[in-house]
Image (cartoon, rainbow, N blue to C red):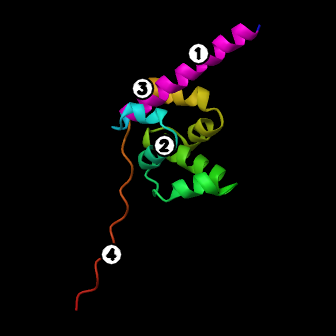
């Protein structure tokens, strides 16, 4: 029974890695970046269009990190034309939703550009 569990676990790991790799490639990022701890979160923040300083919250602030990760996954899902609920699924059941996003037909639509600063009043 232990061998069967190990094989199923390894198959899921390979599936998630391949799905995440394809998700990164769809977003125009290097697929190998999905394999690098911490750097992969920085790339996911870029894909989500979130500020890079969120990495500090995700790494060092308990509770806030969970909230930031859920928001980040929701934003990633929206960048691929999926619902916010799909993003919550990515956060809670990543081994299912990340391969769906990577291997599915969803296309990256790009992170929304920040709003330009208002022009100063004419004098």
Q: CA distance from mark 3 to mark 1?
A: 22 Å
Front label number (3 vs 1):
1
- Residue at numbered disc 4: 118
- Front residue of 30 and 48: 30
- Residue at numbered disc 3: 105
Magenta span: helix, strand or loop, mainly? helix
Up-down relation of residue 30 to residue 100 (above or below): below
Which residue is drawn at the image coordinates 42% and 45% (left, top)?
Answer: 47
Q: CA distance from mark 3 to mark 4?
A: 38 Å
Up-down relation of residue 94 to residue 59 (above or below): above
- Residue at numbered disc 2: 76
- Which element type, helix, strand or loop, lies under badge 1? helix
Residue 99: x and y, percent? Answer: 52, 25
* Disc nearer the start of the sequence (3/1): 1
Extreme-left residue of the structure: 123
- Front residue of 21 and 121: 21
Which residue is drawn at the image coordinates 70% and 54% (left, top)?
Answer: 63
- Residues at discs 2 and 3 in contact (Cβ within 8 Å): no
Extreme-bottom residue of the structure: 123
Q: CA distance from mark 4 to mark 1?
A: 51 Å
- Residues at discs 2 and 1 in contact (Cβ within 8 Å): no
Q: CA distance from mark 4 to mark 2?
A: 27 Å
Front label number (2 vs 1):
1
Residue 55: in magenta span: no
Work out which quarter of the rendered image holds the N terminus and state it.
Answer: top right
Q: What is the magenta range?
A: 2-25
Q: CA distance from mark 2 to mark 1?
A: 24 Å
- Residue at numbered disc 1: 11
- Residues at discs 4 and 1 in contact (Cβ within 8 Å): no
């Amino acid at each position: 029974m232990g061998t069967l569990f190990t094989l199923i676990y390894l198959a899921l790991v390979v599936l998630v890695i391949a799905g995440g790799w394809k998700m990164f490639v769809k977003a125009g990022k290097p697929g190998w970046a999905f394999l690098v701890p911490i750097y992969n979160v920085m790339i996911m923040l870029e894909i989500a269009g979130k500020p890079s300083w969120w990495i500090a919250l995700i790494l060092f602030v308990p509770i806030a990190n969970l909230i930031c990760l859920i928001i980040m996954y929701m934003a990633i899902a929206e960048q691929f034309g999926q619902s916010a609920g799909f993003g919550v699924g990515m956060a809670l059941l990543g081994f299912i939703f990340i391969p769906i996003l990577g291997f599915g037909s969803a296309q990256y639509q790009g992170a929304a550009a920040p709003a330009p600063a208002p022009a100063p009043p004419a004098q």
